[in-house]
Image (cartoon, rainbow, N blue to C red):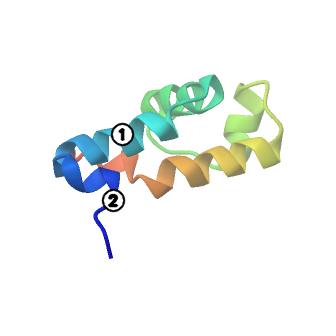
Amino acid sequence: MGATKTDFFTEKQNKLAIIAKALGHPARIAIVEYLLKVNECICGDIVNELPLAQPTVSQALERIEECRINQRKY
């Protein structure tokens, strides 16, 4: 099996690209900013704070969690 394009870059570069992709939408950036402000909350709190539907918030949180952005290790 051949090398993928990501094999040509460092682990740090690949991790930062994953984070950039997860933050590639203004709604996700707004959610991260809100989470940094309150430190912890439930999905309903975000829905009440931001002009986003609950399914949108849930999907955005999944994308953010996928890259483990909350651990700040990159």
**Label placed on residue 4:** 2
Q: Name the side, left or right, on which 71 lies relative to 19.
A: left
Which of labels 1 and 2 is toward the front? 2
Q: Where residue 67 appears, x then y in whole percent?
A: 42, 52
Residue positioned most to the bottom:
1
Question: At 59% across and 33% down in the image, what residue appears?
Answer: 28
Count of numbered tags: 2
- Circles 1, 2 touching at the beta carbon (< 8 Å): no
Q: Amino acid at mark 1?
A: Ala
Answer few, some or many: residues within 10 Å of disc 2's Cα (few below 14, many 20 plus, some between 14 and 19). Answer: few
Mark 1 neighbour class, 10 Å CA radius: few under 14, some 14 to 19, many 20 or more: some
Left or right: 39 as drawn, with respect to 4: right
Q: Is residue 69 above or below residue 3?
A: above
Tell me the kind of residue under disc 2: Thr
**Taking the image as drawn, is residue 43 in sight?**
no
Q: Secondary structure at mark 2?
A: loop
Q: Quadrant of the N terminus?
A: bottom left
Q: Residue 63: where, in percent of width, then height?
A: 56, 50
Residue in the picture at 69% in, 50% down:
59
Task: From this view, report whether residue 34 is shown above or below residue 54.
Answer: above
Q: Position of residue 36 (x, y in %)?
A: 43, 31
Which residue lies most toward the front here? 2
Which residue is located at x 77 percent, y 32 percent? 48
7 left or right, relative to 61 = left
Quadrant the C terminus occupies: top left
Image position, residue 35 (x, y; %)? 50, 35
Q: Earlier in the sequence, mark 1 or mark 2?
A: 2
- Label 1, secondary structure: give it: helix
From this viewpoint, is residue 57 visible? yes
Q: Which residue is mark 1?
A: 17
Q: Residue at x 48, y 38 (%)?
A: 21
